[in-house]
């Protein structure tokens, strides 16, 4: 845009049209044409002006006549000539204006039997150049359109070229946000600042990956270490029951031990998925969800409830199969557990946002509005007595949220029409 502006400002400098002082040679030219016209008028008393304009004369020239008020006798005259006539109407002070192709001189007086006239003469210059510049300057709107037509593709190419490294980094950042921490960085050339930005991003991702790996490994190690004392505790409990017989206290210890073991099993499953992430796979939606929904339908019927889901489309989704399966399964089982009579699944493909929203709703007890965000926290129990009866350990929804974050999606809950809605949003990759 700076180049375009500079060109538009400097272009008029190339305009050679200038009003100059009339030289002695120019006066001689005017007088020569004046004599030629006077002679022609005397020798042709009943002449027509067209005969005068077409009369032979030495050198290439054009003649233009006006009355004393500046009205043209010629039927036609270029606008440059008309403008020159307006600017110079005094035969006492003839003017000269030089254009790239022609030079305009005049006026001088010419007498006929009927009236006094003013004569203007146009000569063709020896060098004809830059006529296009004159034409463009005389048509500023067209000049602007041509300048935009030339500059727009150039600016678009420059913008595309300059932002290409940033678009590459954006793609990398999007993949990292979806959990692909091993995404390779592109080689960036001719941009020191963006190269430094890419290096900083690589260091940040490496540190993040190392921190997450250490955290997940610690969680896995703790879970494994808890398995051994838990096994010994169950063995001691069995021996004590054998020698002393069963009691309420031993039953309570056995129940709590089973809960701890279930919790450790969930933690180990979560850490295994995080430490050994699988590759994403492109799977048709119907193949991925059909078996899961059939199992859920069977489980719901066993509990005297109804599980309803729509006919599954065949469009492709790109997911971590085990993670996505685990997230959806946890939500469905949670819905089956607390629903009174019915669980319904809706699937909406949003092509504009390139996402798919899977909604699982049940007619069970509503979740207090203040608790809708807390239910996804690890080990959070909305109702401790209810979870104690159902055997929940408070990790199912947390695992589902973790899985959705890894996909670059999200999960949220809301109460609508006296039903609990659980929404899972997946990015779509057709």
Image (tube, rainbow, N blue to C red):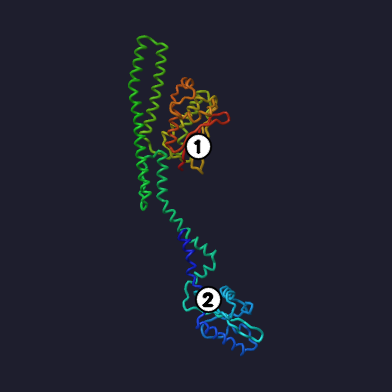
Quarter of the image where one finds residue 40: bottom right
The percent position of residue 176, horizontal first and vertical second, equals 40, 41
**Residue 249 at x, y percent in the picture:** 41, 12
Q: Read off the residue under disc 1.
A: 357
Residue at the far bottom: name it.
43
* Side of 115 relative to 426 (left or right): right
Direction from residue 401 to residue 34 in the image, left or right: right
Residue 184 is left or right of residue 86, and the answer is left
Q: How many marks?
A: 2
Tell me: residue 245, above or below residue 201. above
Q: Tell me the SS state at disc 2.
A: strand
How far from the left and from the top, in percent, is residue 197? Answer: 37, 46
Residue 282, label in figure: none
Give the structural element (helix, strand or loop) at label 1: strand
Q: Residues within 10 Å of mark 1 (few under 14, many from 20)?
A: many
Q: CA distance from mark 2 to mark 1?
A: 76 Å
- Label 2: which residue? 97
Taking depth in this image into account, of 206 and 172 the one nearest to the observer is: 206
Q: Earlier in the sequence, mark 2 or mark 1?
A: 2
Indicate the position of residue 194 as horizontal and vertical percent values.
38, 49
Most extreme residue toward the front is 92
> Which mark is nearer the camera, 2 or 1?
2
């Amino acid at each position: 845009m700076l180049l375009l502006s500079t060109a538009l400002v400097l272009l008029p400098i190339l305009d050679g049209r200038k009003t100059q002082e009339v030289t002695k040679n120019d006066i001689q030219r005017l007088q020569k044409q004046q004599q030629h016209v006077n002679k022609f008028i005397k020798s042709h008393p009943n002449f027509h002006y067209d005969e005068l304009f077409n009369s032979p004369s030495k050198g290439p020239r054009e003649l233009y006549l006006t009355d004393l008020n500046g009205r043209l006798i010629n039927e036609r005259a270029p606008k440059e000539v008309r403008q020159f006539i307006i600017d110079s109407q005094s035969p006492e002070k003839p003017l000269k204006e030089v254009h790239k192709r022609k030079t305009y001189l005049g006026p001088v007086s010419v007498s006929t039997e009927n009236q006094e006239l003013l004569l203007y003469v146009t000569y063709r210059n020896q060098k004809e150049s830059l006529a296009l510049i004159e034409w463009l300057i005389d048509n500023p709107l067209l000049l602007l359109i041509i300048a935009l037509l030339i500059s727009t593709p150039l600016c678009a190419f420059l913008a595309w070229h300059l932002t290409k490294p940033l678009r590459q980094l954006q793609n990398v950042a999007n993949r990292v946000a979806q959990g692909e921490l091993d995404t390779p960085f592109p080689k960036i050339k001719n941009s020191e600042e963006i190269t430094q930005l890419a290096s900083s991003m690589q260091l940040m991702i490496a540190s993040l990956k190392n921190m997450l790996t250490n955290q997940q490994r610690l969680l896995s190690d703790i879970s494994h270490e808890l398995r051994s004392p838990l096994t010994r505790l169950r063995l001691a409990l069995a021996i004590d029951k054998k020698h002393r017989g069963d009691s309420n206290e031993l039953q309570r210890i056995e129940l709590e031990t089973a809960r701890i073991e279930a919790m450790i099993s969930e933690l180990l499953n979560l850490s295994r998925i995080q430490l050994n992430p699988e590759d994403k796979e492109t799977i048709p939606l119907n193949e991925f969800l059909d078996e899961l929904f059939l199992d859920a339908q069977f489980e719901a019927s066993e509990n005297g409830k109804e599980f309803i889901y729509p006919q599954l489309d065949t469009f492709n989704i790109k997911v971590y199969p085990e993670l996505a399966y685990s997230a959806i399964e946890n939500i469905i089982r949670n819905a089956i557990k607390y629903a009174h009579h019915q669980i319904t699944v809706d699937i909406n493909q949003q092509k504009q946002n390139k996402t798919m929203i899977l909604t699982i709703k049940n007619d069970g007890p509503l979740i207090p509005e203040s608790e809708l965000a807390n239910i996804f926290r690890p080990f959070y129990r909305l109702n401790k007595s209810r979870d104690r009866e159902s055997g929940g350990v408070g990790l199912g929804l947390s695992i589902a949220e973790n899985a959705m974050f890894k996909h670059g999606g999200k999960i949220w809950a809301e109460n609508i029409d006296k039903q609990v809605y659980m929404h899972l949003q997946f990015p779509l990759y057709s």
